[in-house]
Each structure stands twice: as structure tokens, then as C-alpha cells.
Amino acid sequence: MSDSDKILRDLENKKYEAGFHADLDEEILPPGLNEDIISKISAMRGEPDWMLEFRLKAYNYWKEQQMPRWAHLDFEDIDFQSISYFAAPKGTKKSYESWDEVPDEIKEIYNKLGIPLEEQKVLAGVAVDAVLDSVSVYTSFRKELEEMGIIFMPISEAIQEHPDLVRKYLGSVVPYSDNFFASLNSAVFSDGTFVYIPKGVRCPVELSSYFRINTAEAGQFERTLIVADEGSYVSYLEGCTAPMYDENQLHAAVVEIIAMKDAEVKYSTVQNWYPGDQEGKGGVYNMVTKRGICKGDNSKILWTQVETGSAITWKYPSTILLGDNSVSEFYSVAVTNHYQQADTGTKMIHIGKNTRSRIVSKGISLGKSSNAYRGLVEIKKGAENARNYTQCDSLLIGDKCGAHTFPYIEVANPTATVEHEATTSKISDEQIFYLQQRGLDEEKAVALIVNGFTREVMSRLPMEFAAEAKKLLEITLEGSVG
Amino acid sequence: MPTLTKNKYLTKQELIEILQNNGEPLASKNIQELAEQAISQHDIPHSKMEEWRKTSLKKLLEHTFRYGKKIDLERHVIERFNISGMYSNLLVFVNGYFVPSLSRLLDSSDIVVFSNMAEARSMFPQVFDKYYNRTEAHKVNLFAALNTRYAADGAFVLIKDNVKVKNPVHIYFFSDGEDQKIISQTRNLIIAGAGSKASVLLSYHPLSTDYMYNNSVTEIFVEHDAYMDFNIFQGEGYDSFHTNLVNVEVERGGQFYSHTISLCGEIMRNDLRVRFNGPEAYAELNGLAMPDHDQVHDNTLFVHHKSGGSISRQFYRNIVDNNARAVFYGKVLIDKGAKKSEAYQLNNNILLTTTAKVHSKPHLIIYNDDVAASHGSTTGQIDREALFYMQARGISEKKARTLLLQAFANEVLNKIQIDTYKFYVKTLIRKRLQGEKVEMLCAKLGQCRFEPDYE
């Protein structure tokens, strides 16, 4: 067996480290979706009437829609009636006030995953909201943040405690009729995170949500809403994992970000849902709608994502650049292996004057996977002097995978400058040879080149996250030779 | 001829009714059947189709057409469209009908067979059967399927093996509706035999005003080690429509060069599809489109690297004025087995007004790791610094703009291989950019006169 064969075999045997399942006593609603289920979810969360109305409106719209099939993804139809839309550990009606109250078996899950919830052990500077299946179980640092006027809590509680804020912004960036999965989410979302940063406040810690699917038959539908008021700043991180099951699970989340005048929001994701086994069995279907709006002048939204998990990824974090001089950047590394399929990218919609956006996307395909970049850059008529630069590079490792690039560039203003460039290639023999000459073995050479290939994106991640992302990437790429 | 009383837009059935009365179809019964099946499956292209997202056919479908008359033109009528200094083998079609009296063959008929399709079918039945619709044009879209089913004539060019054709082959397509809305449907077949070399130019011109519609399909076979230089010139009427499909198959070692110049026309839709059947094949697809007024010029390309070791290059530029819209959709597919393939796409656009639009989609679909592929797309305006530089040296702003636009266009035009034709196109574009009346182009129309309304 040649070196590269051995390495490829090793690669295939790589384990999904977060793939354990915890035996929790969970309360699960029966599978299926209808108005009763939605009313039940709403009632269980003790929601006000307007919330139920919002859900039912979304559900009635969703009923009429067909699942979109335009993405470069090949998967069987999802039976939406066989999914359970609510699962929660028994007895958790509300998020726990302190870590001591959290039941041991839930603590165990997070300890196993290495998520620091316990405040004394917390890396200084990260506040975590932990969402297990359909509910938020614990939010750290809440009190401290409250003193600064920062609201950081499960969205289910925010609906109760800050109904005005939630009502004003929920669905304002991603309306319930936006797309098939956003409608579904609007109808059934059960929890997620709500963040509000008041005027002029610079959030001193990184806020973070950790999403975990535990139950086999349940989907996860969380909703994140981030509002950064004038002149504020926040950095938000998101991580996700799921146990290994043979069935596919559905994750359909919606993230909405609103950045007012002079505000800056940094949103980072390390996505590590269970990708399925080597035969492509099981894995999470990750169908996510993420969108931010630079509402005020000089506002800024930065997206950084590292995508290594999920059997299917369908995700396009987008920014609407409405305010003049607003800026948005999108940095992405997407790695696919085995039978994973990803169709991911971004949308930058320039409306305001002097708006600027930058897209850097790096795709790496291995095994029999398929990895597509799909990005829209749209310059509207009024976007004087808008500027976009897009770079999307793909790296292919092995001859059974696919790498695709689907950019859409639509320009309706002559003063705009839009540039797009992309390359697709494997790691060249010359590169490897050069490094081998200098004493590195083949495996290390590949790692070094991939490291360089993704560096531009990795360097954008917050420090606490960068280490995890690097580790994930290393596991996925271990010894892959072009 | 159906009248549009009930519906505002032509339906598929009405399109079929319009197109079916075209004399004896070229296609064999077998192919006719296949095409009919395809017709029943295809919809009229609409914005939900990925390949037609930004090109609406509503303007085309609000008219009803009929076939034009067979007209024997006098030689002096077409002489206005001559490219000076270009001695070429000529084939002339008017309203889709072949006009033998205006056609001429300079090169020996031993090396090149040159005729209309209807005649070629009876003269070379074996060649005809071997190649006709081998590229399965009917599968591409409704218009190509209708063409496959009903087309009755077109140009036939067969270059024999190892022959280098000295003079270019120039095929004229004139439309003269005598102030009626007419449709012309042509089906062309070009075969470059193994080791041969030739240049072919297809040019489309209007002879009357009012809405004229061309629905054409051209199949090109570049046999192994052959060299084909293929040109399309669309100097069509201000309100003309053109749905144009060119299907190309390139065999081992074959080289295919294409230059598509779209200067005028309400909706110009060019589908150019190239497939590499053998290794070491090469294709270079260049194009320049200059839509003005409310025109839409759409270049949709598809290059299929079915076999490894082949290289494709796409280079398209658009200069968009007024409310016009330019669409570039370049797709490259590299198959699993197509090792050592190279694919490059480049699309540059200049918008001249605040209402002009451009849509650029350079797509790469790659299933093999041993490839080198890249694409680039830029959209902007004339470089302000270059403009300033020239103004600082005493060149007026207007003149400087014209020069810069010319330079932008020339990078594509310089790739044209027939020198006389290259000069002809450059002259036309220079005149147009300077706002002069372009005599040779739209003599009767005048509307196509280009007034560059910058800012």
C-alpha cells in the first residue's frame, strides 16, 4: 500500500469525536407538524399571542411551499412529518439560574464536549448560552453583562422579558416568507439566543452559543437575534455538534443581525455537526438562513465560518449593506469529506453609497464529497462607489471529489467596482517536492500548504475559537496527499 | 398565423404553429420524433430557469411572426455589407432561403463542399446522416428543439481531411420582412475534416425595419487535429431578436476558436456549447457585446471537458449603455476522468450609465483534482486615472473616453483571425463609439446610431 493510500485510509477511519449520545430523560413531542403542534410548542414556552400568530402565519405560508432544489446537492426528500419538532430534557422549563442547579447528566455532555460552562473554569472572556435540542439549558455570565445593559439570554426568555425589542426585530431581516427553511423555522423555533447591545457599549467578552442535538428523531430549529445599537460592538461565536445516528437529522436555524449606525458585529461559526459515516449514512442536514443588515451608516458586519461537519450544508450568510459607508466581510473555510455535500457562500447586497464588501472563501474537498461556493454580489442602482472584492479558491484532494464555483455578479451602477477571482487546483507536486527537499515529510508538507491556504480565514477567528477550528481542520486533513 | 387576441404573449402552441409551415424539414423521421418529444418537455424559457434568469423573452413573445418570402436580391443590395478586401467563399441566405445566384465558391470544390443543407442532404446522405443533430441540439432548449424539428434549410460546409482552405467562408443571413414581422429559421452544419484548417464567418444583417426574429442552430464538428476559426457577427436590426445555438464537438488535438461580436439587436441570446471528446483539444471562446437602449445581449457558454488534457479559455467583454443589459453565463464542467484539464474564464464589463446593468456568472463545476481552473470577473467604469492622465496631456474628455473604450474592445477584437474582418469590425466600433452614423450596419434604421451618453 502506497503512502497516500495509507493516509487516505487513515483519513477515512478518522473518528467524529463529538458523536456520543447522552441518555437523558427527555420530553419529546410526537413527530409531525400541524397547527396543534405549533400551538403546543408556543404554550409550553408560555408565549404571548403575537408570537403564536407569527408562528401560525409562517406555518401557513410554509405549507404552500416546495422544498427548493436549486442547490448543487443530491439528497432525498425530507419527510417533514416524521420529525419531532420539540425535545427537551424533562423538567427544564426555563434555563437554569446557576451552574450548580444544572443536572449532572447535562453537565456531563458539556464536559465531554469540552465546553467551559462552569464559570470558574471559563476561559476569561467568553460567555456561553448552551442550547440542548430545543431548549437553552444554561447561560453563563448573564448577571455581569446585565449590569452593562447588555441583554444576553435565551430567546424564549427574551420573548417574556423584552417583548418590545424582540417583536420589533424578529423577522425584520429574515421575514417568515423568506425561504422554505426560514418559514419552517419561524413556525417551530423553540429556542436560541437573543443579544442586545445598548448604545455605545463595547461588549467586553465574546458571546457564544453552543448548539447540541441529542435526540435522534428531533430536529433543531434555533433562532438567533443580535441587535447592536448605535456605536456598539459585539463579537459572537457559535459552535455545534450532534451524536452519531444512522438517520439524518434536520437543523434549520435562522440568524438575524441588525447593526445600527457605527455599530460593529463580528459573527463566527465553527460548524461541526455529525457529517455521517464513511458510506454517507446519517448525518445532519444543515439548512440555515443567516442574514445581517447594516442598517445605519458606517456600520460593519463580519462573518467568519469554518464548516467541517454536516452531511448536507445549505448556508449563505448574507449582508444587506443599507447604510452609507457600511462594510461587510465574509471569510469562509469549508471542508468536505466522504459523502458530505456543501453548497455554501454568501450574498452581499449593496444599497448604500460607498459600501464595501470583501469575500474570501476557501473550499477543500476530499473523498467523494462535493463542495460548492455560491455567492451573489449585487450592486443596486443607488450604491454609488460601491466596492466588492471576491476571491474563492478550491483545493481538491483525491480524484473522486468535486469542487464547484457559482458566483452571481449583478451590477446596476456604473461607479461600482466589482472584482471576482477564483482558482481551482490540487496541491502541486512541485510544492510538495519543494517542502520535502527541506526535510518535511509528505504529510507535514500538505498540512503546511493547507494551513497557508486557509490562513487568511483562520486568522480572522477569535483566539478562543481559532484553536478549536485549527484542530478540527487538522483532523479532517490529517495526512491527505494530493 | 395565430393572432394574439386572448393572450398577451405567444404560447408554446402558437410558436409551434408559426414554425411548422416551413417546407420539408431537414431532419429524418427519427430525429423529428425525438425533437417532438423534446418540444413537449421544454417550457418556453422563463426567469425560474437558471440559464434564463436574467434574460426575459417577453419582448419577443409579444409579437407574432410569420416566415418571410423567398426574395431574389440584386447583387448591389448586399454589396453594402461587403467587407472590403475580404475575398471569401460566399453563401447567401435571405429570410432563411438559400440564394444560389449570390453565392460563389473561390476555392476548389474538391477540397471544400459548400452548399445549402437541403441540397447537401441529397448529395451526401451518408455525411448528412452521420452528423446531423449528433450533438443532440433538441435537448438544449425549446427553440433548439423547434429548430431541429422544423428547420428546412441552412448552410452546409464540409472541409475535407488535411485541407487548408485559403479563403474564409462567409455566410450571410439577411432578413427582409418588407415591413412585416418575420422569422427566419436556419440550421447549419460545419464539418472540419481531420487535419484541416478553415475560417468561417456567419453574419446577420437586416434589410428592413420592424421586428425580425432569427432562430438558428449551428453544429460544428472539429475532427482530430483540425483547426476551426469560427466567427459570428450580429449587426442585426435595432429591434431584432436572435436565439442562436452553436453546438461544437472537438476531437483529439482539434482546435476551435470562436469570436462572437454582438453589436445590435433587441434580444441577442447566444448559446455556445463546446464538448471535448478527445485529449489535447483546445477551445478559445471570445466575445464582445455592446447592447444599447433597452437591449439585452446574453452570452451563455458551456464547455464540457469530457476528455482530459484539454484546454478551454473564455474571454468575454461587454460595454453596456443606456438601459441595456448584458448577461454573461460561462459554465465549465470538468468530468471525473478528465485529468490535466485547464479551464480559464474571464469576463470584463463596463457600464456607461446609471441604468445599465450587467449580470456575470462564471461558473466552474469540477470533478477532478488534477486540473487548473480559474475565473475572473470585473465590472466597473472607465478608469478615472487613465482618463485624467490623458486629459492632462491635452486630450479632451470625450476623446479620451472613446479611446479607452476602443482599447477595451480591441483586446477582444485583436483575437479575430481574419485580418480584413478584424479591420472592418474595429472600424465599425470606432465609428460607433465616436457617435458617427454607421453606414454599413443599419443603413436603413438610423436608430442604432450610438450616442454615448456618459453620466
Image (cartoon, coloured by chain):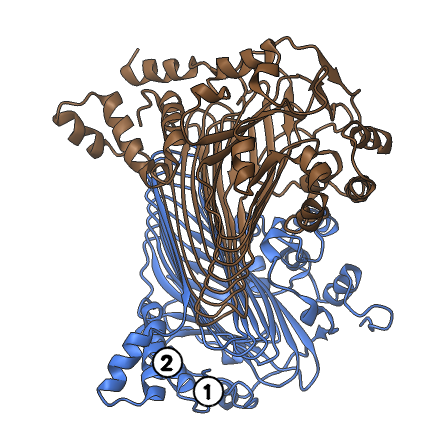
Chain that bears disc 1: B
Q: Position of residue A285 (x, y in %)?
A: 61, 29
**SS under mark 1:** loop
Chain (blue): B
Q: Residues within 10 Å of mark 1 (few under 14, many from 20)?
A: some
- Residue B118 numbered mark, or none: none
Query: At x 48% / y 28%, what residue is drawn?
Result: A369
Q: Which residue is mark 1?
A: B440
Q: Quadrant of the N terminus of chain A?
A: top left
Q: Position of residue A144 (x, y in %)?
A: 52, 33
Query: At x 72% / y 15%, what residue is drawn?
Result: A90
Chain (brown): A
Q: Looking at the image, which residue sits at the far left?
A: A438
Q: Return the residue nearer the eye: B320 or A474.
A: A474
**SS under mark 2:** helix
Q: Quadrant of the C terminus of chain A?
A: top left
Q: Return the residue nearer the eye: A315 or A195.
A: A195
| Disc nearer the start of the sequence (2/1) | 2
- Taking the image as shown, residue B164 lies to the left or right of residue A294, namely left
Q: Position of residue A363 (x, y in %)?
A: 41, 37
Q: Position of residue A241 (x, y in %)?
A: 54, 23
Chain that bears disc 2: B
Q: Pointer 2 and pointer 1: residues touching (CB < 8 Å)?
A: yes
Q: Return the residue nearer the eye: A117 or B259.
A: A117
Query: At x 32% / y 54%, what residue is drawn?
Result: B162
Q: Which residue is mark 2?
A: B424
- What residue type is disc 2 on? Tyr
Q: CA distance from mark 2 to mark 1?
A: 10 Å
- Taking the image as shown, residue B147 lies to the left or right of residue A431, namely right
Query: In the figure, residue A101 lies in which quadrant?
Result: top right
Query: In the figure, residue A35 lies in which quadrant?
Result: top right
